[in-house]
Image: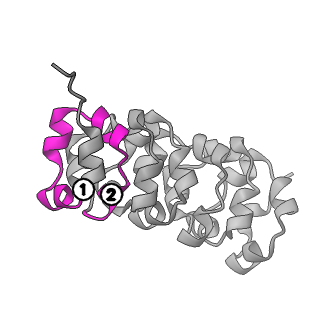
Amino acid sequence: MTSIVSSLSLSQIRQLSTETIQQWSTEDVASLSTSQIGAFSSKQIAALELEDIGILSDGQISAISQGAIIGLSLDQIGALTHSSIENLTTGQVAVLTASQVGALSADQAEALTPSQVQALGTAQLAALAPEDLATFSTEDMAAISYKAVQGLSPAALAALSSGQVAALAPLAVAGLTTDQTERSRPTRSPR
């Protein structure tokens, strides 16, 4: 039997219940156009099974609206491939919750592009573990904004390589708080 999912209009997609979406096969989900995926609500996105998230193309993932991407569960975030992460739009990255960003694996954090890193806010950057930040390229580090840099914990700063710290933009360095710089220094042993 041929599925009708790929022929549903955008208004029909918007009216679908989460129960209906949960009944779709992986093939049904794979057949969705980027426009159809873009019509999903956050609840509809949340209704997709992990296997469904795993088979979505990079184009389908990047078509998820900013209003819907916040519906991805932490498990669904974990199912995103390196390539899917690289293809998220900066608008999608900007609206991810701190919990969603914190759920990224080190490999997924490494996939973030400089433009995506630039879209991260303070709470999102604070949600990344030191081992996630250690995967950032010097270009990623240079993209951290003046405001977002305040989300780096002293432990995260201490875990960065000298090259990563040197790559921070002068304005970002100016955004570091005294607490960040004082607590991230190695402690000296008394003489």
Picture quadrant where residue 117 is located: bottom left
Location of residue 32 with respect to 11 vertically, above or below: above
Nearest the viewer among 4 and 158 is 158
Residue topped by disc 2: 150
Residue 175, visible in the rendered structure: yes
Q: Which mark is residue 122?
A: none
User: Which residue of the protein is positioned furthest toward the top in this rendering?
Assistant: 191
Nearest the viewer among 59 and 145 is 145
Q: Let me know if residue 160 is in the magenta part.
A: yes
The image position of residue 182, as x and y in percent, is 24, 44
The image position of residue 24, as x and y in percent, is 81, 53
Q: Type of residue at label 1?
A: Leu
Picture quadrant where residue 187 is located: top left
Residue at figure coordinates x 69%, y 60% from the top left: 45
- Which quarter of the rendering shows the C terminus? top left
Residue at figure coordinates x 37%, y 46% from the top left: 153
Residue topped by disc 1: 176
Residue 87, visible in the rendered structure: no
Residue at figure coordinates x 56%, y 52% from the top left: 100
* Tag count: 2
Q: Type of residue at label 2?
A: Gln
Residue at figure coordinates x 45%, y 59% from the top left: 123
Dot 2 and dot 1 residues touching (CB under 8 Å): yes
> In the shown orientation, is residue 147 left or right of residue 26?
left
User: Which residue of the protein is positioned furthest toward the front in this rendering?
Assistant: 191
The image position of residue 35, as x and y in percent, is 58, 70
Q: Which residues are magenta?
A: 146-175
